[in-house]
Structure formats: structure tokens, C-alpha cells
């Protein structure tokens, strides 16, 4: 199992985002997670495509854009132009989920579906073969620094089973990303439940020494027996 660590810039120093991006990648980040909030779909306001474009020259790893916006479609092309690799959105925020997934693909990016803690996995039924990533929220979206919701572990196990079945059927890789409250002391249990990609915002950026924190996350992951 290849594990990926995706530090969320939401907890970075916004006055120095270029340096933060470069430093967190130098410290071992596999992806840069870019949280977009619109004060409509979620009660917070962050950054848009201009800022994504500004960090792009520093991002030598994929930019993993997490759209917490409604509506979705108008921003897809903007983020594609701004250098996004993955673009994930919340199904509740799009009137036509299949169309939005196709739009992301047509723009040259990899589509992802982001599911809130109470959003059922059933909404993957007719779209899983079209996406490259499933993002399970383990906190309610809108803020960094919240506590991991424990029953997300059960949901992860069920999502893992669906993804494994789809991968066996099609041979296509689909990442299973967890977002919210990931720390060195719970990442092993989260991986054991089936996640392969880990967003970590406050854990990485409030620690100061990014290499040390990402190292601690990887050390914890080494204790996981592959399923
Ligand atoms: C929350 C965001 C997360 C957040 C994670 O709505 O989607 O990516 O930044 O932050 P931590 O790791 O602090 O929970
Ligand atoms: Zn996120």
C-alpha cells in the first residue's frame, strides 16, 4: 500500500504561501491540499483560483483542490487553468454530479467526490467508475483543527470495500482520502480502516518542524499491516 500525505495549506501562514508550499514539499508532502471555501456551502471563506495559480510555481507535487463551494461548475475551469491536478467537490453542491465529474475530466484534471460525515456512500453507486479519488470528511467541512469523528473509521472500511471491488473490476486506481483531524496518534488506525491518502492541516503546520511531523506520520504508518 502506497500512502500519501497531503498537508492542507488552510493551516499554513497565508502571508507566505509560496514558501510554505515549498517547505512542506521539501519536508516530504506527496500532495498539497488546497481548501476552497465560499461562505455559502460552508461557513468560512478562504482562497480561490488566483491563489492556486500563485502557488503553482512552488508546487512540484500534485495540487489537490478541495472545493467546498456551491455551485461548483463555474470554478472548475478556473482551477484547471490555475494548475489543479485533482479537483474534488461535494455532491450536495452540484445539481448534476455526473456532469460536474465529466467537466473536471474534460478540463484535464482528476475528479474526486467529497462526502461529508453524514453523507451516505450510496451516492458513489453510479459515479465511482468515473472518479479518481473519494474524499471522506472526518470533520464537518469549514474549519481546520477539529477533532476526528470516530465513526468515520466504519465508513472508511465500507468505502475501501467498494473501491477495492471497483478496482478489481476495472483495474483503475481510485484514491481513498481522509480529511479532518488526522494526527500522528490516529493515522495508523485510519490507514488500517482503509485510507491511503491523508490530509493533515493543523497537525503539520502548527507543529513548526514540518519534516519532523510528516516523519512522525510516516513512522506511524509503517506500523500498519496491509489489508
Ligand atoms: C476542513 C478542510 C480540511 C482541514 C483539515 O473543511 O477540508 O482540509 O484543513 O484540517 P485539520 O487537519 O486541522 O483537521
Ligand atoms: Zn480539505
Image (tube, rainbow, N blue to C red):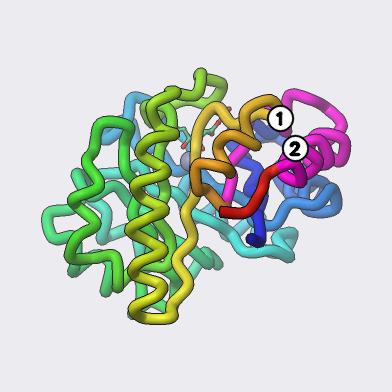
Residue 219 x, y percent position in the rendering: 81, 41
SS under mark 1: loop
Circle 2 residue: 220
- Between residues 53 and 60, which one lies in front from this camera angle? 60
Residue at position x 62%, y 64% in the image: 62
Picture layout, residue 127 above or below residue 16: below
* Residue 219 among magenta residues: yes
Callout 1 environment at 10 Å: few (<14), some (14 to 19), or many (20+)?
some
Picture layout, residue 116 above or below residue 28: above
Residue at position x 36%, y 50% in the image: 159
Callout 2 environment at 10 Å: few (<14), some (14 to 19), or many (20+)?
some
Residue at position x 51%, y 19% in the image: 147
Question: Quadrant location of residue 74?
Answer: bottom left
Q: Main secondary structure of the magenta part?
A: helix
Q: Are marks 1 and 2 in contact (CB under 8 Å)?
A: yes
* Residue 59 among magenta residues: no
Distance CA(mark 1)–CA(mark 2): 6 Å
Residue 28 x, y percent position in the rendering: 80, 52
Q: Is residue 187 visible?
A: yes
| Quadrant for the C terminus in the image | bottom right
Residue 115 x, y percent position in the rendering: 32, 43
Circle 1 residue: 184
SS under mark 2: helix
- Between residues 169 and 74, which one lies in front from this camera angle? 169
Q: Which region of the structure is painted magenta?
A: 197-223
Q: Is residue 79 visible?
A: no
Amino acid at each position: 500500500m502506497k500512502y500519501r500525505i497531503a498537508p492542507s495549506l488552510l493551516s499554513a501562514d497565508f502571508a507566505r504561501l509560496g514558501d510554505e508550499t515549498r517547505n512542506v514539499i521539501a519536508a516530504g508532502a506527496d500532495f498539497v491540499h488546497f481548501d476552497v471555501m465560499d461562505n455559502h456551502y460552508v461557513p468560512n471563506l478562504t482562497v480561490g483560483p488566483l491563489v492556486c495559480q500563485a502557488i503553482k510555481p512552488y508546487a512540484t507535487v500534485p495540487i489537490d483542490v478541495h472545493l467546498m463551494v456551491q455551485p461548483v461548475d463555474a470554478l472548475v475551469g478556473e482551477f484547471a487553468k490555475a494548475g489543479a491536478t485533482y479537483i474534488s467537490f461535494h455532491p450536495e453542491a452540484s445539481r448534476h454530479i455526473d456532469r460536474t465529474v465529466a467537466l473536471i475530466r474534460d478540463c484535464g484534471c482528476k475528479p474526486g467526490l467529497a462526502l461529508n460525515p453524514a453523507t451516505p456512500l450510496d451516492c458513489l453507486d453510479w459515479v465511482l467508475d468515473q472518479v479518481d479519488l473519494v474524499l471522506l470528511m472526518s470533520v464537518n467541512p469549514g474549519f481546520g483543527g477539529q477533532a476526528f469523528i470516530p465513526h468515520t473509521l466504519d465508513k472508511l472500511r465500507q468505502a475501501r470495500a467498494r473501491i477495492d471491488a471497483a478496482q478489481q473490476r476495472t483495474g483503475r486506481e481510485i484514491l481513498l482520502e481522509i480529511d479532518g483531524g488526522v494526527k500522528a496518534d490516529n493515522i495508523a488506525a485510519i490507514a488500517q480502516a482503509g485510507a491511503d491518502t491523508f490530509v493533515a492541516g493543523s497537525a503539520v503546520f502548527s507543529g513548526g518542524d514540518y519534516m519532523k511531523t510528516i516523519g512522525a506520520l510516516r513512522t506511524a504508518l509503517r506500523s500498519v499491516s496491509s489489508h
